[in-house]
């Protein structure tokens, strides 16, 4: 008999998997599918970064590294945080390099959350947050994001959700799945709540460099009084197209980072040695490939907004960051899961139902613009036909 732990049996497999599996089966039957379900860049890792990792391998950097990460990388991260985010950490004890942001988030939650502690989590959001909180025995409390408020955090809603058990707040800007970017005024209000109620803040900034129009990324850790209670999570998966390298980090004051380091020691010991040398080059080398990638994403973003907004019963908040659009299909009498399946079967576009990101995501679909411009253009032609068909049957 297999005795699965209560901890793991309360966690479902990702619902993104269902769409992905059906899309794969369709492809095996010869259908061409446009993949807009996967949250990763379709670009290759820039060559200069690959070269640095190859050199590290050839130079024999094949062993465990210091738990926190190699000195060159912790220093590069400290320099980057100072220059770009106006946050000063000590490279010797203010950062832990991990196997992706996901490990950094897991380490952070396990380091601070006791069974029964409440953690404020945006709804919709990347679902991993709430499942990792649950795995640690904590209770995720949704902070509802609304389309009519541009998917920003609503301070009154947050104040209503606070209780004596609230220990941590998770924020993610630019945001997956809506693409919203929290403006500095909103961050200042959030900071005030965190200080008034003595909360820790986990600030997931993985999409910070994928930002458009007049939006500006501000790290909440840079606001007065916030450094001591904030853990910055960032990494290399998105901006440098290094998702397969599995590298991220948690950064902040020593008082918080020490406990994250302890968890990391028992979890993975250290991130992959030669990959860390690539990450040093990602931060210290030319940023031109990042700029090129952002320009390409921006063209696709504009295309998607124009096309979706022109379709019947579809509305779309203009995303200012990340590489997702989160259109609403509210006039349609169908769950977002059924709609995603219909879009897959009839328009041959794989995308994710909004309900996969929390209850507040029902009625929406997440589309990642990590496919080429022409592919997206053709996919939108097919989607338009499906939407017109649904709409003509509805009236
Ligand atoms: C908001 C958010 N944070 C973190 C991650 C994971 O990052 P990593 O690849 O560094 O584990 C993702 C991946 O999709 C994400 O969307």
Image (cartoon, rainbow, N blue to C red):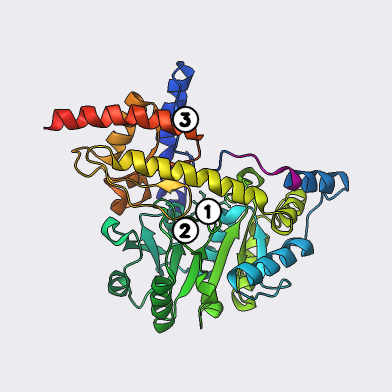
Q: Report the disc number at residue 375.
A: 3
- What SS does tag 3 mark? helix
Q: Residues within 10 Å of mark 3 (few under 14, many from 20)?
A: few
Tag 2 and tag 1, C-beta contact below 8 Å: yes
Name the residue beneath numbered marker 1. Answer: 210
Mark 2 vs mark 1: which is more N-terminal? 2
Q: Quadrant for residue 14, please give it.
A: top left
Q: Quadrant for residue 169, please give it.
A: bottom left
Q: CA distance from mark 3 to mark 2?
A: 25 Å
- What SS does tag 2 mark? loop
- What SS does tag 1 mark? loop
In the rendered structure, which segment of residues is drawn in magenta? 43-48
Tag 3 and tag 2, C-beta contact below 8 Å: no
Name the residue beneath numbered marker 2. Answer: 174
Does residue 296 appear to the left or right of 277 in the view shown? left
Identify the residue shown where x is 53% and y is 61%: 205
Q: CA distance from mark 2 to mark 1?
A: 8 Å
* Picture layout, residue 214 above or below residue 1: below
Q: Residues within 10 Å of mark 1 (few under 14, many from 20)?
A: many
Q: Position of residue 242 (x, y in %)?
A: 64, 46
Mark 1 vs mark 3: which is more N-terminal? 1
- Comparing 240 with 380, the one in front is 380
For this orientation, the residue located farthest to the top is 30
Q: Position of residue 159 (x, y in %)?
A: 31, 75
Mark 2 lies within 8 Å of ligand 1 (Cβ measured): no
Mark 3 vs mark 2: which is more N-terminal? 2
Query: Taken as a whole, is the magenta stretch helix, strand or loop?
Result: loop
């Amino acid at each position: 008999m297999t005795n699965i732990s209560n901890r793991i049996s309360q966690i479902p497999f990702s619902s993104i998997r269902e769409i992905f599996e059906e899309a794969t089966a369709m492809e095996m039957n010869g259908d061409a599918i446009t993949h807009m379900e996967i949250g990763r860049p379709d670009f290759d890792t820039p060559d200069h970064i690959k070269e640095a990792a190859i050199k590290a391998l050839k130079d024999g950097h094949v062993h465990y590294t210091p738990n926190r990460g190699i000195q060159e990388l912790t220093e590069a991260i400290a320099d980057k945080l100072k220059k770009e985010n106006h946050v000063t950490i000590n490279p010797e004890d203010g950062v832990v390099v991990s196997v992706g942001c996901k490990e950094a988030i897991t380490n952070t939650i396990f380091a601070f959350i006791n069974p029964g502690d409440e953690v404020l989590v945006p709804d919709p959001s990347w679902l991993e947050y709430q499942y990792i909180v649950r795995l640690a025995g904590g209770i995720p409390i949704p902070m509802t994001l609304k389309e009519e408020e541009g998917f920003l955090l609503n301070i009154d809603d947050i104040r209503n959700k606070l209780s004596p058990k609230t220990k941590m707040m998770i924020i993610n800007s630019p945001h997956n799945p809506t693409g919203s970017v929290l403006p500095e005024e909103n961050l200042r209000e959030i900071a005030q709540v965190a200080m008034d109620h003595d909360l820790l803040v986990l600030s997931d900034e993985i999409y910070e460099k994928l930002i458009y129009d007049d939006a500006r990324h501000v790290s909440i850790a840079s606001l007065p009084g916030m450094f001591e209670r904030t853990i910055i999570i960032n990494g290399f998966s998105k901006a440098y197209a290094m998702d397969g390298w599995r590298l991220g980090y948690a950064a902040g004051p020593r008082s918080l980072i020490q406990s994250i380091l302890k968890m990391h020691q028992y979890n993975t010991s250290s991130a992959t040695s030669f990959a860390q040398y690539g990450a040093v080059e990602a931060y210290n080398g030319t940023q031109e490939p990042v700029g090129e990638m952002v320009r390409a994403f921006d063209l696709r973003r504009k295309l998607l907004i124009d096309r979706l907004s022109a379709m019947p019963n579809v509305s779309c908040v203009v995303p200012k960051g990340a590489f997702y659009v989160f259109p609403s299909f509210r006039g349609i009498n169908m769950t977002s899961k059924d709609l995603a399946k219909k879009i897959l079967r009839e328009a041959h576009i794989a995308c994710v139902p909004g309900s996969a990101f929390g209850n507040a995501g029902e009625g929406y679909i997440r589309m990642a613009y990590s496919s080429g411009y022409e592919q997206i253009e053709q996919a939108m032609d097919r989607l338009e036909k499906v939407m017109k068909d649904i709409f003509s049957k509805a009236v």
